[in-house]
Amino acid sequence: MQYHVDGFRPGDPDVLPAAAEHRRAGQPLPPTVDVLIAGSGPAGLCLAAQLARVPRIRTLLVEPKLGPMEKGQADGISVRSMEMFQAFGFAERVMREAVWINETTFWAPAAGAALARVARVQDVPDGVSEMPHVLINQARVHDFFLEVMRNAPTRLTPDYGLRVATLAIDPAAAEHPVTVTLEHTAPGREGQTSTVRANYVVGCDGARSNVRRAIGGALHGDAAHQAWGVMDVLAVTDFPDWRMKSFVRSRLEGTLMVLPREGGYLVRLYVELDQLGEHERVAERGLDAEDIIAKAQRILAPFTLEVKEVVWWSIYEIGHRLTDKFDDVPEDQVASRTPRVLLAGDACHTHSPKAGQGMNVSMGDTFNLGWKLISVLTGRAEPSLLHSYSGERRAAAKGLVEFDHRWSRVVGGQLADDAHDELPRVAREFVDNLPFTCGLTIQYEAGALNGPPEHQHLARGFPIGKRLHSAPVVRLADARPMQLGHCITVGARFTLFLFAPAGDVGAPAGVVAALCDWLEHDAASPLRRHGAEGEDVDAVVDVRAVFAQDFRALDFARMPTLLRPHVGRLGLCDYEKVFCADARRGEDIFEQRGIDRAAGCIVVVRPDQYVGHVLPLSPRGELTAYFGGILRQQGAGERRNAQPLSPRPGTPPRACS
Amino acid sequence: MQYHVDGFRPGDPDVLPAAAEHRRAGQPLPPTVDVLIAGSGPAGLCLAAQLARVPRIRTLLVEPKLGPMEKGQADGISVRSMEMFQAFGFAERVMREAVWINETTFWAPAAGAALARVARVQDVPDGVSEMPHVLINQARVHDFFLEVMRNAPTRLTPDYGLRVATLAIDPAAAEHPVTVTLEHTAPGREGQTSTVRANYVVGCDGARSNVRRAIGGALHGDAAHQAWGVMDVLAVTDFPDWRMKSFVRSRLEGTLMVLPREGGYLVRLYVELDQLGEHERVAERGLDAEDIIAKAQRILAPFTLEVKEVVWWSIYEIGHRLTDKFDDVPEDQVASRTPRVLLAGDACHTHSPKAGQGMNVSMGDTFNLGWKLISVLTGRAEPSLLHSYSGERRAAAKGLVEFDHRWSRVVGGQLADDAHDELPRVAREFVDNLPFTCGLTIQYEAGALNGPPEHQHLARGFPIGKRLHSAPVVRLADARPMQLGHCITVGARFTLFLFAPAGDVGAPAGVVAALCDWLEHDAASPLRRHGAEGEDVDAVVDVRAVFAQDFRALDFARMPTLLRPHVGRLGLCDYEKVFCADARRGEDIFEQRGIDRAAGCIVVVRPDQYVGHVLPLSPRGELTAYFGGILRQQGAGERRNAQPLSPRPGTPPRACS
């Protein structure tokens, strides 16, 4: 964590200095905003938390409910989401408070017993991430995002009791072209409406999204016509795997999933209820918590289950649906228009909750969108950058819906095909799916944001288009062992990791030093082309280097000036740009991530932690071209418009609309 | 973290349910309290945070300053203190926010240069603790304790603007025998006094303690007659080890220490100023921040130092002083009286700040005292238990003062003796002292609280009287890899770790099962003798077991009932009592801590994380005797008086005075 760069500030460093002229909680609705977010679920809050950190951006987050969520709904946090939480600064707190899923077991009739443990697998394969797979009440994830918002310069809070009813886009308007009609939902205010005009509207308003409907979108897909019950309980049982993730498939009563929850006592159960008729809706059955408990008891028999408290429950039917496009621009108008309305989360994809993906994919949507919106709104990128959002995230959602279709049928499937298998089919599929359920298989397609794979061989462990797979390093200046990926914090800044070839020890002769010199001074350098007048050299593209030597073999004073930049109001040196392989602990990042030791390489990481490009250390035109395809050039005239992207903790905001 | 045991509660699990009938901030001073704490430094706050968690105890914390601290003073957090913070629940936050000290370097004139790096050592030796050595503004440590207090059932907050002026003890009074006169310090209230009567008074009121004076105590010792400057700065320098802990000894100008600080930019400097005359006080010199900066620049030359902001500074002279006794009972009256007034922190020991020990030893004082006071105030122990405080902590403080005496003279010493040494004397001494400066050498003497070493050979890595050296294990019920020591949370509960002999797999035949059966049911068991009617079986002595097998080789259902107790209002099962060696990761606790694999053993851990005893699994009389020497037997009549010791997070307080 870096703070105090512009002078010492007492107190909690996560509480950033407040920007002036922002609307405070309880003040009347503003007539216009930069971004209106509909819905304060994980997608909406994840976006709001990113935008809230940029003093320049005025955001309105509306939520039909009358206050923050307290319980229920999603609970699974994939390792990928934990990596994202790390960038937001609350991963440690989630790790402390959540339950870790370490082992998954499978129970079925076997060896003469009604139920026996027929398989067990480690839940997260070794080495796929430095983060654990955890479960925690969705409400707590909301709380953490809300805290980021409260602590951000804009002090953003949701406006509860407001629903987006409809919206209209005026293609002729240059400013605030989207007119949004908001319905009040608080008792006594029902039927009242308000109007807000926005530059962008993001619909995170769930499966029945009004935002989606307003732009003519629809969810397409099918349903499994099968009812499931879900409940959070405090219960007493003699089932021994009550604190492991467990799949329990009875001979005649169907399937149940046990998901231990935070705090050591709470458990989430998914219970297969009944097959539905083709046109039947689950609500028609009139099922309730007692039905779920009774069915769970029958599936778990001969183990006993005594429910002491039902904390939350719901009954749902499995559906797998996807919308055609995540924004308001039809395919045939992409060349002539840029998006003004975007969709995220359940508003564009629905699926069963049983693979624990819902919250993760929804947050993944707006973690992809956040930096793009920030870049556009701060004048760093052209609005056309927003086209990439639908393309990248619809492909990810399609993968999810297809996976869920298959997986739901495996979990709810019949027993017959398990006969004589060493590992039951559900366990086999579970193992095969682990990289997917960990959130690690998404690979964005090659294009402007994700370079061609031409130089991928220089860093085989950092596939372009996939999330940066962090690895241990030692920071040169203070010898701190840490994760390389943890130097990326939430915002809209790109990172260039320069992996030095063996033998390079810095200036004056090294390849890294030569590249740094070019990056710092050449007119073709992305730092110069896209950085604004007067801002820190690392404001838009953050250059960091990783050397192959032990830290004791290197001299900080020989590092190129770009790697020890002087920043902030006081011009203090940033000592956190240079890292070394952690060979002493047997954790050599060059080895672990397949870096070409002779050549070294550049790994470009997008603000959302995805690898944007892998390039050799010498050819510079490709680097210029890559950033030129994403960011606007900041000419002398335009520099005045460029706004700070991501405030350093402790930096008083310099501009605010 | 365990919570929701008595039913689901939404929100932050660290915020415990408020107990009724406690004084709230801003209400008038109460006429009587259980404990009055003078001073809200690290010693006072560490004690208050422990007491605040017990609904039964009414505490008043007075502080002459008018509000919480913002900067300055101590900043070193030893690994031992980090272990303690872990029990309080805020170690993760400190680790995230603080700077980690990983490497210490030594600079001196060498090889023709005015300054060269002549030695470097890893700051914390491998394997001594799972925690890092960190530095952070003392004010932030205060903030974390204040948050624990605010979140505790009693919602305790300090009363600022009040100083203990004097106190009187009435030996004849059975209740609230200490009458304390408080002076108001707020502008406009100077000269006003208030009176509060207390059962116990703890003087954490610094080197000029009025509490100490009131009980006739004095600090004895000597001074080095040498002035040092200390300052926190934001500065620009070309000295390359600005983010390492560094000792810089110039040829003619004396010594300077660089201590990097939290946030990546701030640095603390200790600068040797001048030798003082024998009767001269440093204040007489009229030195200020400019003098410290100028001296630092001369010492660091030829490196440059440009100070951009002085955050805080002070000038002090080295003194090493210790008081005779840490309570009000003279040695010759120990048999006839029990302590009513106790001292902690700088009130009983002063020393130079340069070994980073001050805050740590002060918190260590009241971490030793807290559980004893709680045990006495809740009727679990006789007041004579409090005698052990002065004995244990005075020995620890004596070790510190002696160390500091030697170390100050090494750091401020002359250069001559370094000639021709491979490792300069200061570096050699530094390495030799690391276990001490890590806070790991304190060993409380054998006695009632610390058993005789007769069975120490059963667990050589858990020396009786020293803090429990945690090691990795896997929790059986959920396969979670974790630190064994982290299952101890702050409070007054003892822990019995049962290390199972090889081959023991639980009930019905195992040795551990037989011991658990005795512990659960036998009238001589400490659990039955010292537990109160109707309270959870683990309320006073928490029994946990560690098995030698991999977790997959054990069956949770075979664990003795004591190791899967049903607890709380709902009678839910606690699944967190059984652990296994983590052989798969090569971290076998039996190997690492020298446990006798054939015999197994019991390791008794005190509430303050110190090892109280090591015993074989079979002889039970020694166990009965050990606890009988500390805790009161809860007879049928007395059980009504016993109060909950440490609330589980989420447990509504059951009693409150």
Image (tube, coloured by chain):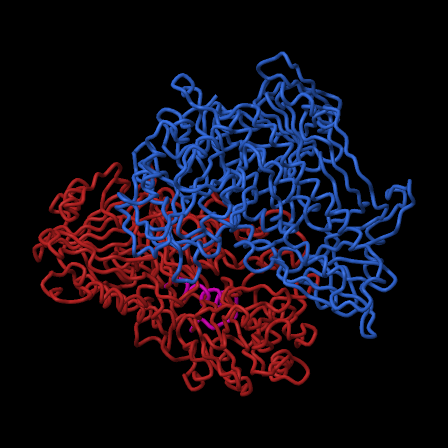
Chain colours: A blue, B red
Say if the magenta span includes residue B371: yes
Q: Judge whether residue B20 can be spotted in this image.
A: no
In-image side of B229 versus A494 (left or right): left
In-image side of B509 versus A487 (left or right): right
Look at the picture and state if B371 lies above or below B268: below
Asked which quadrant contains residue B117, the reply is bottom left
Our reading of the magenta stretch's main secondary structure is helix
Q: Given the current orientation, which residue lies at the most extreme top position?
A: A172
Instruction: Give coordinates of residue A438: x percent, y percent.
Output: 62, 51
Q: Residue at x 88, y 45 (%)?
A: A286
Asked which quadrant contains residue A391, the reply is top right
Q: Quadrant of the N terminus of chain A?
A: top left
Query: How many numbered callouts?
Result: 0
Say if the magenta span includes residue B653: no
Asked which quadrant contains residue A330, the reply is top right
In-image side of B499 versus B223 (left or right): right
Q: Judge whether residue A3 can be spotted in this image.
A: yes
**Nearest the camera: B103 or B169?**
B103
Magenta region, residue range: B365-384
**Nearest the camera: A535 or B503?**
A535
Instruction: Give coordinates of residue B199: x percent, y percent.
Output: 43, 62
Look at the picture and state if A468 lies above or below B616: above
